[in-house]
Amino acid sequence: MTMETRSWHKHYPPEIPTSIAYDEKPLHHFLEESAKNYGKKKALYFMGKELTYNEVYEDTKGFASYLQKLGLEKGDRVSIMLPNCPQSVIAYYGVLMAGGVVVQTNPLYMERELEYQLKDSEAKMILCLDVLYPKVANVKANTSVEHVFVTGIKDYLPFPKNKIYPFIQRRQYQMLVKPEQSTDTHIWKNMLDESSGQVAPIDIDPKEDLALLQYTGGTTGFPKGVMLTHFNLVANTQMSVKWLYKSQKAKGTMLAILPFFHVYGMTVVMNFSVMMGNKMILMPKFEPEDVLKVISKQKPTLFPGAPTIYIALLNHPDLKKYDLSSIEACISGSAPLPIEVQEQFEKVTGGKLVEGYGLTETSPVTHSNFIWSNRVSGSIGVPWPDTDAKILKLDSEEEADHGDIGEISVKGPQVMKGYWNRQEETDQVLSEDGWFRTGDMGYVNDNGYFYIVDRKKDMIIAGGYNIYPREVEEILYEHEAVQEAVIIGIPDPYRGETVKAFIVKKQNSSVTEEELNEFCRKNIAAFKVPRIYEFREELPKTAVGKILRRTLVEEEKKKLEDQKPLQNS
């Protein structure tokens, strides 16, 4: 890859190249390589159980072999509906090794969402947790699914946890699911016992062949399947390796809280760890106290996360009881990182926490601050190696001047092939020469550092003024009583839209609407100050902790619709 010199390249430390010679190999090759080089090293830690790279590789071959025996052909889609557990890693690489395409499926999906994704992707097979099996069984007949694989958390728990867990599960889910092996239902342990482990080699073209169909959140319309090739994912992972240049092969320990069914966790946590031969500490769900205990005992060095994860840890009442000093580096993604949170977290851990940026369509990372040099708080940093970026004037192909707000557009080896079966929508965002329009509004300063101001569709227009929620949220986060804040625009007959703030207060803190109003008026222009405040115990979030702004918008719309008949009566 060659890359023209850009203004941000002058800030690159000598350890990070502006261009990389990427390995044009299938993604699963890196698991094989780590098993060869670090076979006896611990690859996974899961609730007390540890697996070596050799053990992970053998089970991966076992699963791949079983898939091929059932008739999986190159390019067939296989859905994985699991939280972070050993099976989620083994199945991911097993599907790729067998020549399939992974479809990551959120375990929290309801039947309607699951059925839509299975139909749209035309998945031929699905692997799910035993407690999710009833959902899968209920929709299977309406989809292309021919085979269901069932596993359980207990399958990789150490004794006696594996014996106790079914009782915990029965209490937690009010059910105990025991699917039977049949011609179209396959039990994980039986599959691995029966598998020959012999995998027929598949000819993969890394630049052309898909590794992944990753569905976008669907905040507008139905979710779309983002087509990512082996090369897209290998390139983005190798960029991560260069960016985290102080992390040595087979030396680091990765805290895996970000779910692997989300592209951020998949690349920056799972693929990165496997490529580096690092140990992953798998956590199936985020519970602040459990995370603090695990950090204190297992001593992870790397901790990618989302702002809400760091906020929850910082506000835990027993934070000071735990030793978090092992943490060396964290890249925060999926939402803006408040400066207050960055500073507090670095003070508590002694490590570095920086903001990055990316999208499902870009595998996902395109920008980040430097971890150990030249970082700019409040900025998403600079483009990664071989990644170009520019700001386009609103609804135009013309480039904006430095400092002017416009739509961020990016180009690089991590940019998707397109949307699955949606050529028209692909053409709207992806140009013939590879530039992808992100839908995010931002600007670049004279030094080449990029700033996000908001999603194009989240911009609020009140009384003719453009208001960017992130700017107002940053101010609210500075108030000592505010734990979480989100800003939306709601319809207003006079101003067009007006600004509403949703606030979660810190434990044992109190603040009134009047006090927040006064605080905002001291720090931002009057037209940006929220006119309405709503205090909540919690805010709706995605699995990676991203606050669901659109959910709050929809709630407000429904409130207005419900009020209309009352007003007319």
Image: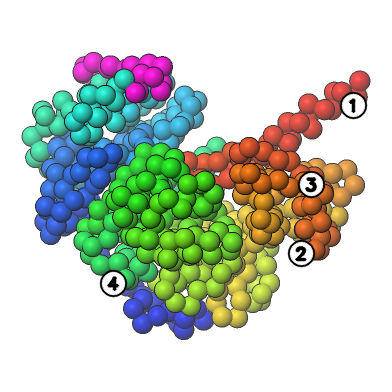
Q: Kindly state the secondary structure of the residue where label 4 is placed.
A: loop
Q: Kindly state the secondary structure of the residue where label 3 is placed.
A: helix
Q: Nearer the viewer, residue 199 or 345?
A: 345
What residue span does the magenta drawing correspond to?
Answer: 168-184
Observer-side mark, 4 or 3, equals 3
- Label 1 and label 3: CA atoms lie apart by 27 Å
Give the mark, 1 or 2, whose residue is nearer the N terminus.
2
Is 406 placed left or right of 424 in the picture?
right
Give the mark, 4 or 2, whose residue is nearer the N terminus.
4
Tell me if I can see residue 67 in this picture: no
Q: Which residue is mark 2?
A: 523
Give the mark, 3 or 2, whose residue is nearer the N terminus.
3
Tell me if I can see residue 144 in this picture: yes
The quadrant of the picture occupied by the C terminus is top right
Marks 1 & 4, CB-CB < 8 Å contact: no
Give the mark, 1 or 4, whose residue is nearer the N terminus.
4
Q: Amino acid at mark 2?
A: Asn
Tell me where residue 222 appears, x and y as whole percent.
Answer: 55, 37
List the single residue furthest toward the front.
Answer: 321
- Label 1 and label 2: CA atoms lie apart by 37 Å
Give the mark, 1 or 3, whose residue is nearer the N terminus.
3
Q: Amino acid at mark 3?
A: Glu
Observer-side mark, 1 or 4, equals 1
Q: Which residue is mark 4?
A: 21
Q: Residues within 10 Å of mark 4 (few under 14, many from 20)?
A: few
Tell me where residue 215 appears, x and y as whole percent.
Answer: 45, 42
Observer-side mark, 4 or 2, equals 2
Q: Which residue is mark 1?
A: 567
- The image quadrant of residue 403 is bottom right
Tell me where residue 496 appears, x and y as whole percent.
Answer: 84, 48
Q: Amino acid at mark 4?
A: Ala
